[in-house]
Amino acid sequence: MKKIGLILVGLAVLMMAGALTFQRQIGSNLFERAAQQLVGRNSLDTLNDGLHVGLCGTGSPMPNLERAGPCNVIIAGKQVFVVDIGEGGNEVLNIMGFNPADLTGVMLTHFHSDHIDGMGPLMLFHWTRGNSTAPLPVHGPSGVEAVIEGFNAAYATDDTYRIAHHGEEVVPASGGGATALPFEMTADTVTVLEQGGLTISAFNVDHAPISPAVGYRFDYKGRSVCISGDTAKSANLEAACQGTDIIVHDALQPVMVEEMREAMIARGNPLAAQIFHDIQDYHASPEQAAESAQTANARMLVLSHLVPPLPLEYLYPAFLGDAESRFDGPIVIGEDGMLFSLPPDSDAIEQSNLM
């Protein structure tokens, strides 16, 4: 028995030595295979015609390694729009297989930092990943002009570096930065864009004291998706999203946030605790989002912009509270990489994950 044990130990040592000897070659082969699979991957090529909504960021300003800041991608045929672009959203978008160079435009719901702080990388990739000759179009309510002017100014010097290094054939000087396309909310719901069979509507939401703050509805070939942006429970959202297939709604669980507030007080940090108190009045709870989805006769509710962070799926039931009793349809807690596909003139909702 002792000899057998020694033989096994010896074999293990030899195997480890062999693995170390060939580690470089094995690593090179693995990287080459991954590069072939991932570089140039384009998820658009795999999507059938229809309306699709992907989650490229389901987090909040609170640190969470599993979730980027607020980011949604809408695909209608070959038109591609990003709704909000939080920190890390561009990275997730690329990992999901969507090339920012293919973007038709960006829709901003409001100008809180966590909804716009991924704009710089998105502008850069829109330009450099497809030698774009025109800036990235960014739609938003009045005030978007100042936001985009600031990002363009911040990246102006970097743009000159890119052109000097790669040349205008690769990065045309006319393609850097972004162009602001503001619209006015002359009514509670306005049509922002109609093209290629797609209609995009903006609707006012309640995110006071932040104003303007809007959500968006996308209608394409008999299917529709609503993105709430940031809002407390909103009667206008319920009206604007009547009969929609999916509502992607921000969600804050006040019971959990209150526990975090109390912990901060106990640690002697009352100013941070005040912020945790204040944020509870301008985000809907999961239960309120469920009530809105029920009132709107939506077919599915997807919760995103999750507060507080949910590092474990085990926490999902506590986060939901009793939301499931307030909505007849399915409720999905959003995760980065999720994709929901709505085939034309159908009732089907197909769910997949691109990460």
Image: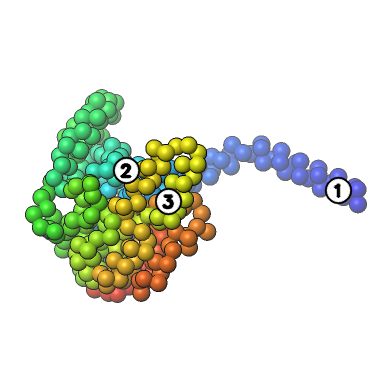
Q: What residue type is labelled 2?
A: Asp
Return the residue nearer the eye: 22 or 16.
Answer: 16
Which label lies toward us, 2 or 1? 2
Q: Do the residues labelled 2 and 1 touch (CB within 8 Å)?
A: no
Q: In which quarter of the image is residue 53?
A: bottom left
Q: Residue 257 carries which label?
A: 3
Local crowd size for mark 1, using a 10 Å CA cut-off: few (<14), some (14–19), many (≥20): few
Foreground residue, 230 or 58?
Answer: 230
Residue hosting label 1 = 5
Residue type pointed to by label 1: Gly
> SS at mark 2?
helix
Compared to residue 94, the image places residue 288 above or below, namely: below
Residue beneath label 2, please?
114
Q: Which of 208 and 317 is in front in this view?
A: 208
How dense is the environment of label 3, judged by Cα within 10 Å: few (below 14), some, or many (20 and up)? some
Residue 43, horizontal then vertical, whole percent: 34, 55
Relative to 345, residue 114 above or below: above
How far is the residue under mark 2 from the one under mark 1? 58 Å
Horizontal side of 13 relative to 304 (left or right) equals right
